[in-house]
Amino acid sequence: MNPYVLVILLSSLGLGTTLTFASSHWLLAWMGLEINTLAIIPLMAQQHHPRAVEATTKYFLTQATAAAMILFAATTNAWMVGEWDINSLSHPLASTLVIAALALKIGLAPVHFWLPEVLQGLDLLTGLILSTWQKLAPFALIIQVAPTIDPYLLSSLGLLSTLVGGWGGLNQTQLRKILAYSSIAHMGWMLIVLQFAPQLTLLALGTYIFMTTTAFLSFKVSQATKINTLSMTWTKNPTLMVITTLAMLSLGGLPPLTGFMPKWLILQELTKQELPLTATIMALAALLSLYFYLRLCYAMALTISPTTTNSTLPWRTPNTQSTLTLALTSSIALGLLPITPAILALVT
């Protein structure tokens, strides 16, 4: 892609998200979401591959539907209440429509079906943008409208997303689909605690972004898109294999890695709010996700000689990709747990 075009598209991505962050009016927020969607579409379709074009079409249709629903909900609220302000979402029909549209935007269950299919059709870098940056603007709106949403609806969406994200990833062999279901499960964790402690939602979103960035970049460096190719990573780059394995365990939420921190604090908050059943279901759903992360760890670290796989060994071509970003994100994704008290003091 032409570098000038690329700069324009990435600037538009930043502009769209910033516009939604800064807006208090529904039309401005909607405009930011639309700029965001239109900026990423050329990036998704740049491969000119039938799968990429199909993924782009699916993404455009779902995002356009969600944007139309947001506009309809905002208009309905303005008609009923006489206010266009985001914090004045007081009509139950409008608030339910808005949370449904934003759930479709970020791929929460039960409107998650587009996300694994779209992510599977993209290259790893565009998939990374879709899994991290594109979640920020809708999540900013969800945090703003959360006080007006029925708490049972938020809890149901959170629980269902965590369960679906765990169950859906169990049978996958494609790494991008596994990361898509991982995204759905993590969004569920963020949503379940939103009504009690929004600062924990932001903390979980931040740690999720760093862990997912580490996973995508390490897969890109090792040029792996399937579990089968991942099983041969240790022959090409043993250090990268160790980092990727630890990143997977961090995504699964195992101590002493960063991923344990948000899950631990969210379960603690749910227990404080006297919701032991919800906390138990969330903890059990985390085990489902942990299983498919452990499958990846097994493929990477436990198929080393003498228990090798029957796959063909890949060529050891020299790596020319920059790994500075991977080094930074992996440091954050693996080592923040000891400074949990300091992070809590910052976010609360």
Image: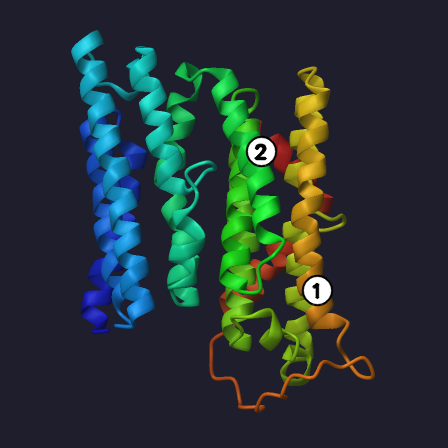
How far across and down, in percent of the image, does residue 240 sit? 63, 73
Q: Does residue 132 appear in this view? A: no
| 2 or 1: tag closer to the N-terminus | 1
State whether residue 280 is above or below residue 246: above
Q: From the viewer's side, name the closer residue of 75 and 51.
A: 51
- Residue drawn at (66%, 24%), measured in percent from left and top? 278
Q: Residues within 10 Å of mark 2 (few under 14, many from 20)?
A: few
Q: Amino acid at mark 2?
A: Leu
Q: Is residue 146 left or right of residue 305?
A: left
Q: Amino acid at mark 1?
A: Cys
Q: Total of numbered circles in the picture?
A: 2
- Residue drawn at (54%, 53%), measured in percent from left and top? 210
Task: Assign a secondary structure to mark 1.
Answer: helix
Q: Does residue 8 appear in this view? A: yes
Residue 106 sits in which quadrant? top left
Instruction: Identify the colour scheme used.
Output: rainbow
Residue 346: which numbered mark, if any? 2
State whether residue 145 is above or below residue 1: above
Q: Is residue 232 left or right of residue 1?
A: right
